[in-house]
Image (cartoon, helix red, strand yellow):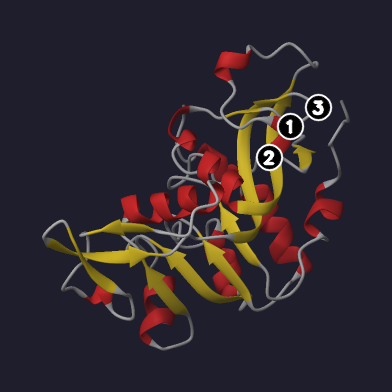
């Protein structure tokens, strides 16, 4: 099996302007800060980001927002990031909101190759604007579209050279879904083990989903906001 490790500079250089990028993380846990920071350094523009949250001010994707690299953010909430709220209110940043469970299911649906799903969540609210509504089993349902990405950035605690990934704690919430929903997956990894050392039953994202591995020499201060 091939070794998928690559430098962070080379990995992020694959991202073109205008790319749709799914970024893992549940708040701080599982957010790939190093990949995000390299994207800030390289400066790709007109990006569409898919992320559960907007991180906090001066952390994670907020650096991309402040750098003017993001055209649109698809997310479940931005309340912890005053910059994102202001950019939305000033019409600088387009925001598409999905309820957290719906966001997760849209990603899972894309990864499963499905064309969409039905839900009554959001019917008769602003979340239903622009969406098709049908009658199903006696109630109104929205048709939610799958959420597909060109690239995914994920953060794993442990991996082998082929890209079998293990996430720590709540990093399991969105990282596996992001990896399923993207055409090209870049994983930053805290530590690696030899091929065959991972117990198969503990693997959260199998190697065939992963295209490249970035082995982190050290973690930046952002990772220390919470502890496992």
Residue drawn at x 72%, y 40% as measured from the top left: 210
Say which element carries label 3.
Answer: loop
Residue 174 in view (yes/no): yes
- The front one of 169 and 82 is 169
Residue identified by numbered label 1: 163
Classify residue 215 by image quadrant. top right
**In terms of sequence position, does the residue under pointer 3 or pointer 2 come before the other?**
3
Residue toward you, 217 or 7: 7
Q: Quadrant of residue 83?
A: bottom left
Q: Residues within 10 Å of mark 1 (few under 14, many from 20)?
A: many
Q: Is residue 125 above or below residue 98?
A: below
Please state the horizontal and vertical placement of residue 93, each as a whole percent of the image: 48, 81
Q: Which residue is mark 2?
A: 209
> Is label 3 in contact with label 1 (beta carbons under 8 Å)?
yes
First-in-chain label (2 vs 1): 1
Q: Are marks 2 and 1 in contact (CB under 8 Å)?
A: yes
Whether residue 127 appears in this view of the structure is: no
Relative to 35, residue 70 above or below: below
Residue identified by numbered label 3: 161
Q: Nearer the viewer, mark 3 or mark 2?
A: 2
State the residue at coordinates (81%, 27%).
161
Marks 3 and 2, how far apart at CA = 13 Å
Q: Nearer the viewer, mark 2 or mark 1?
A: 2
Residue at x 84% of width, y 36% of height: 4
> Which residue does the image show at 52% across and 75% down from the upper left?
72
CA gap, disc 2 and disc 1: 8 Å
């Amino acid at each position: 099996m091939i070794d998928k490790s690559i430098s962070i500079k080379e990995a992020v250089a694959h991202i073109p302007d205008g790319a749709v990028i799914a970024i893992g993380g549940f708040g701080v846990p599982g957010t790939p800060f190093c990949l995000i920071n390299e994207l800030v350094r390289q400066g790709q523009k007109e990006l569409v980001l898919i992320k559960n949250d907007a991180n906090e001010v001066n952390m994670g994707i907020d650096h991309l927002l402040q750098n003017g690299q993001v055209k649109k953010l698809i997310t479940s909430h931005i309340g912890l990031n005053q910059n994102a709220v202001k950019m939305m209110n000033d019409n600088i940043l387009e925001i598409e909101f999905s309820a957290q469970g719906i966001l997760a299911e849209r990603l899972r649906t894309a990864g499963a190759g499905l064309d969409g799903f039905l839900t009554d969540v959001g019917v008769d609210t602003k979340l239903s604007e622009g969406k098709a509504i049908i009658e199903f089993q006696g109630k109104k349902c929205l048709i939610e579209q799958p959420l597909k990405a060109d690239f995914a950035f994920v953060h794993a605690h442990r991996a082998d050279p082929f890209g079998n990934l293990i996430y720590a704690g709540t990093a399991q919430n969105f990282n596996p879904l992001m990896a399923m929903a993207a055409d090209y997956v870049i994983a930053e990894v805290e530590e690696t083990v030899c091929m065959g050392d991972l117990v198969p039953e503990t693997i959260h994202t199998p190697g065939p989903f992963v295209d490249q591995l970035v082995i982190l020499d050290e973690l930046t201060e952002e990772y220390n906001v919470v502890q496992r």
